[in-house]
Image (cartoon, rainbow, N blue to C red):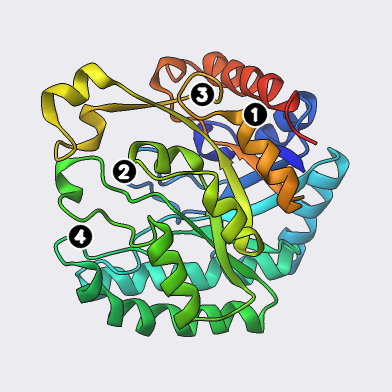
Amino acid sequence: MELGFASAIFPDLSLQQVVEFASSSGFSCVELMCWPKGGAERRYAGVTHIDVVDLTSDQAKQIKELVTANSISISGLGYYPNPLAPDAREAAVYVNHIRQVILAAELLGVEVVNTFIGRDWTRSVEENWLRFKETWQPLIKFAEDHDVSIAIENCPMLFSKDEWPGGKNLAYAPVIWRRMFEEIPSPNFGLNFDPSHLVWLQIDYLKPLREFSEKIFHLHAKDVRVDRHRLDEVGILGYPLEYHTPKLPGLGDVNWGQFFSVLSDVGYQGAVCIEVEDRAYEETLERRRASLVQSGSFLKQLMA
């Protein structure tokens, strides 16, 4: 397995600075964010370490030389919008950019693009399903044609009032993953698996590692703490951030020893990228750097 981090935590650093930090801190890889330039309203979104719009072969060559010179790899290109947004024009913009990220991955020799399925959060899973197929069947075919795999993160994107009640990502649970992969049975269609989301959803995060072992293309290492005293106040129908808190690996409820034990059993050898969303460590650049070093030291003890 390769240990790295998601670059979204460094919106204020250049690509070169991110790569050099990864190398000097003992990481093997980085998931690089590829949002369109101009930012985004959502927290951790809008970060552009590779501008994929009109990326040229020469620019791709320079990026590959940079990562090679620093003895790391690019684990995946990250872009996490809502391709099933209820506004069709908005959704089309997101879908078009996903295609551009796929083309950039091909140019860079990167095997994986990490993203969300998306969802119209005002409608049920069933009511979203036709749009899922209409949107993602051609996108997966496009990825296949360019020898790129799509890894869908299992975050429900259900945290705040504007995402209520359904969340903005359809692919949050095993029953939905199973159906997705049956509808689109492509070897290029899989998961960017994050155990922390399953914790607060009260889903066993070890069982899917076995069932979906061949569909796990990339991993996010993020922890979460379910605060029982807060849950007792609002219940499971409260806004999720009212009762759970994202934390660094080792500071929450994920049993990382068991997690990596099962990963090794199923033969996973891919990237494990730390995703820092712990607000206790976000105040300064130095704190964010330190959070990755701390998380890396913790996880390295457990990784085969």
Above/below status of 218 relative to 148: above
Q: Residue at x 74, y 47 (%)?
A: 265
The residue beneath circle 4 is 121
* Marks 1 and 2, the one that precedes in the sequence: 2
In the picture, residue 19 is in which quadrant? Answer: top right
Amino acid type assigned to the residue bearing label 4 in the image: Trp
- Looking at the rendered structure, the kind of residue marked 3 is Leu
Residue type, label 1: Gly
Kindly identify which residue carries mark 3: 248
Residue 248, placed above or below residue 274: above
CA distance separating discs 4 and 1: 35 Å
Give the CA separation, mark 3 to mark 1: 15 Å
Provide residue 94's location: percent of width, then percent of height: 38, 67
Mark 3 vs mark 1, foreground winner is 1
Counting residues from the N terminus, which is met first, the one under dot 4 or under dot 3? 4
Q: Mark 1 points at which residue?
A: 257
103 or 59, which is in the foreground?
Answer: 103
Residue at numbered disc 2: 42
Foreground of the two, 265 or 243: 265
Earlier residue among tags 4 and 1: 4
